Image: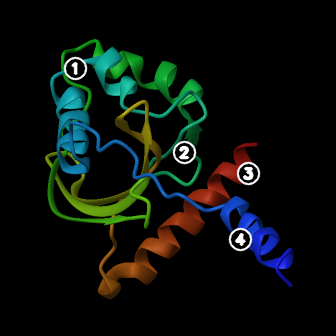
């Protein structure tokens, strides 16, 4: 028995212990990151705008059903819009942000005031990369009031029919 006690103590002392280390908090918060990202579009800063994405495989959903782009496809498509000094103007409000337990990921939804589309919504996922929040996924949507949703649906179906006949 006397030999068993040191062996048990040694085994307990050598067992693996899970150590949780909080990630370094990014200098800028999610709100600041997203506000700066939207502002880069408003001021036509192409390089800055696309630097907020995690990488070329990050996803941007536009308002059209065909607009599911990786950044590697979205960036060249959007470049001409930035050349005029302003790509688009989205002013966010009513943003709600949630964080993963380890604070390495954040997801959010926001409302956007836009001069060309009216009220829009954005939602997405950000990830801490190199001590900065980066956008991994963004979804832009135009909310449709329930009172007119069937009219909009019918217009979309009619347009799809026209497009199908043209193909």
Q: Which mark is residue 21?
A: none
Q: Earlier in the sequence, mark 2 or mark 4?
A: 4
Residue reaching furthest to the top: 83
Q: Earlier in the sequence, mark 3 or mark 4?
A: 4
**Which label sits in the foreground, 3 or 1?**
1
Q: Earlier in the sequence, mark 1 or mark 4?
A: 4
Identify the residue at horizontal 22%, vertical 14% (top origin): 84
Q: Considering the numbered disc 2 on the image, is that residue within a helix, a strand or a loop?
A: loop
Q: Whole-Å distance between the Cαs marked 1 and 2?
A: 21 Å
Can residue 140 be seen here? The reply is no
Please state if 98 lies on the left or on the right of 111 as rendered. right
Q: Considering the numbered disc 1 on the image, is that residue within a helix, a strand or a loop?
A: loop
Identify the residue at horizontal 86%, vertical 85% (top origin): 1
Q: Which residue matches tag 1? A: 44
Is the C-beta separation of discs 3 and 1 under 8 Å?
no
Can residue 145 be seen here? The reply is yes
Q: Whole-Å distance between the Cαs marked 3 and 2?
A: 21 Å
Q: Which residue matches tag 3? A: 165
Q: Whole-Å distance between the Cαs marked 2 and 4?
A: 61 Å
Q: Considering the numbered disc 3 on the image, is that residue within a helix, a strand or a loop?
A: helix
Is the C-beta separation of discs 3 and 2 under 8 Å?
no
């Amino acid at each position: 028995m006397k030999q068993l006690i040191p062996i048990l103590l040694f085994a307990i002392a050598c067992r693996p212990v899970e150590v949780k280390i909080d990630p370094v908090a990014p200098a800028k918060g999610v709100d600041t990151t997203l506000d700066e990202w939207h502002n880069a579009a408003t001021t036509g800063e192409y390089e800055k705008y696309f630097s907020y994405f995690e990488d070329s495989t990050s996803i941007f959903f536009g308002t059209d059903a065909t607009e599911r782009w990786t950044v590697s496809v979205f960036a060249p498509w959007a470049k001409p819009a930035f050349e005029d000094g302003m790509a688009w103007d989205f002013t966010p409000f009513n943003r709600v942000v949630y964080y993963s337990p380890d604070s390495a990921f954040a997801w959010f939804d926001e409302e956007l005031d836009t001069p060309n589309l009216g009220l829009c919504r954005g939602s997405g996922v950000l990830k801490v990369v190199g001590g900065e929040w980066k956008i991994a996924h963004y979804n832009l949507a135009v909310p449709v009031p329930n009172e007119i949703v069937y009219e909009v649906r019918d217009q979309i179906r009619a347009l799809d029919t026209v497009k199908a006949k043209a193909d």
